[in-house]
Amino acid sequence: MRIAIFGGRFDPPHIGHWLVAKQILEKRPDIKEVLFIPANKHQWKPIEAKGADRLSMLKYFVNNSMKVSDTELRRGGVSYAIDTIRDIKKRFNHDIYWIVGSDILLEFSRWEKTENLTNLATFLVFPRDPFSKPKKLPKGFEIITGEDLITTNLSSTIIRERIKKKLPITHLVPKEVEAYITKHKLYL
C-alpha cells in the first residue's frame, strides 16, 4: 500500500492543510491514505500549542482516507522525518510518500540526514503561493501539478497572528478547530 505522510507543526491545522491532503488523494489515486503527523518539537521553529491540542484539532480532518498519528509526539524530542519514515516503514511496510510545500525546497538541505531521506520516501511537492516551478527538482522529489489545483499562501502563522489581533479566522480553519481554539484560549 502507498501512503503519504503529511508532517508539520499544525499550529493550528487549517483548511490549506486539508486542501493539500485532499488534492494529493485526487491527483494520486495510487496513494490510499494521508497520515497527518504533528511534530513533537521542530528542529528550528517554535511550536505554541501543546501536542495534545494540535492532535485534537487534527482529528477533525479524519475520514476514510485521512488519518492522524501521534508517533512523533510519543517518541518525544526533536521530530526528524528520517525517524518517522523508518518507524512507519517498520510498522507497516508501506511505500512512503512525504508531502511538503514548495517553500520547503529552499530549506530541505537543513533537514536531518537528507542523503538518506530520498532512499526511504518520495517527496511530493505541493505548490504554495507565490510559487514558481523549479527548473529541476532534487532526486526523489515529484511536483504535484494541474491547472485545477487550489493553492494558497495560508499559513498557521497568519492564523495565529489574526487570533492575537482579535481578527476572525472563520473559513480559514474548520469550524470545529475554531471552536477548539476559542474554548481552550489558544494563541492569545
Image (tube, rainbow, N blue to C red):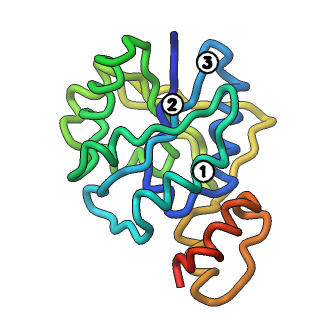
The residue located at (32%, 53%) in the rendering is 40
Position of residue 106 relative to residue 170, above or below, is: above
- Residue 66 relative to residue 97: left or right: right
Q: Write down the residue under mark 1.
A: 128
Q: Position of residue 167 (x, y in %)?
A: 71, 85
The kind of residue tagged 1 is: Arg
Outermost residue on the front side: it is 183
Q: Position of residue 75 (x, y in %)?
A: 25, 43
SS label for mark 3: strand
The residue located at (35%, 38%) in the rendering is 71
Q: Write down the residue under mark 2.
A: 124
User: Mark 3 or mark 1: which is in front?
Assistant: 3
**Distance CA(mark 3)–CA(mark 1):** 23 Å
The kind of residue tagged 3 is: Lys
Residue 53 seen in the figure: yes
The residue located at (33%, 64%) in the rendering is 45
**Distance CA(mark 1)–CA(mark 2):** 13 Å
Query: Are dots 3 and 1 in contact, CB under 8 Å?
Result: no
Q: Position of residue 137 (x, y in %)?
A: 43, 31
Q: Quadrant of residue 109?
A: top left
The kind of residue tagged 2 is: Leu
The residue located at (62%, 33%) in the rendering is 66
The residue lying toward the viewer, choosing from 59 and 118, is 59
Q: Write down the residue under mark 3.
A: 32
- Residue 46 relative to residue 19: left or right: left
Q: Which tag, 2 or 3, sits closer to the chain's start?
A: 3
